[in-house]
Amino acid sequence: MTAPRVLIQTQDFDVSAELAALRAGDARVGAVCCFVGTVRDRNEGASVSAMELEHYPGMTEKSIEAIIERATERFGIHAAKVIHRIGPLQPMDQIVFVGVTSAHRGMSFQACEFIMDYLKSEAPFWKKEQTPEGARWVDARVSDEEALARWQP
């Protein structure tokens, strides 16, 4: 059985172990690229003491699988993996891991960024932040939509 390319989980992840597993036994790999997103203690000028992430089970995994497929077709990458945490998180906690392998660095960098840009805009996740003023849902950012637009033909 092959390892899943998409994991949605409450527990933390080990970046080194995930990268090692992603490239294990594949002599074609000449480049490995990854992105790790973490919880910040500030957002939109407000202090953030905690964040809670929710998702739509089943739909979220399908959405991310489709993003990985598009990246594979577009950039010719060898492998990719996305781990996204849900549930309560604190500042400095890891939220998301995107790992990509390919023959050359350019493809890995582009595919990793492509996956992350689409993940931010298309995957069904919802964030609620705890601030001194109370809880608030985080809206989509214009900058995320602008980042996505650059991948359009």
Image (cartoon, grey):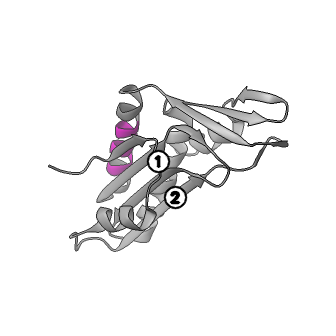
In-front residue for pair 106/18: 18
Task: Answer yes or no: is residue 93 visible.
Answer: yes
Please state the horizontal and vertical placement of residue 119, each as a whole percent of the image: 50, 40
Circle 2 crowding by C-alpha within 10 Å: few under 14, some 14–19, many from 20: some
Three-letter amino acid code of the residue under disc 2: Phe
Q: Is residue 67 magenta?
A: yes
Residue 38 lies left or right of residue 86; in this view the side is: right
Please state the horizontal and vertical placement of residue 39, each as a whole percent of the image: 65, 49
Q: Is residue 128 magenta?
A: no
Please state the horizontal and vertical placement of residue 103, each as a whole percent of the image: 32, 69
Residue 128 lies left or right of residue 120; in this view the side is: right
Residue at the image position 59 percent from the left and 52 percent from the top: 93
Cβ–Cβ under 8 Å for marks 2 and 1 = no
Circle 1 crowding by C-alpha within 10 Å: few under 14, some 14–19, many from 20: many
**Secondary element at tag 2:** strand
In-front residue for pair 31/46: 46
Residue at the image position 42 percent from the left and 48 percent from the top: 83
Give the quarter of the image for residue 23. Answer: bottom left
**Secondary element at tag 1:** helix
State the residue position of label 2. 35
Three-letter amino acid code of the residue under disc 1: Ile
Which is closer to the viewer, label 2 or label 1? 2
State the residue position of label 1. 115
Q: On residue 107, which mark appears?
A: none
Please state the horizontal and vertical placement of residue 26, each as a whole percent of the image: 22, 69
> What separation in Å lies between label 2 and label 1 (alpha carbons)?
10 Å
The residue segment tinted magenta is: 64-72
Residue at the image position 84 percent from the left and 35 percent from the top: 132
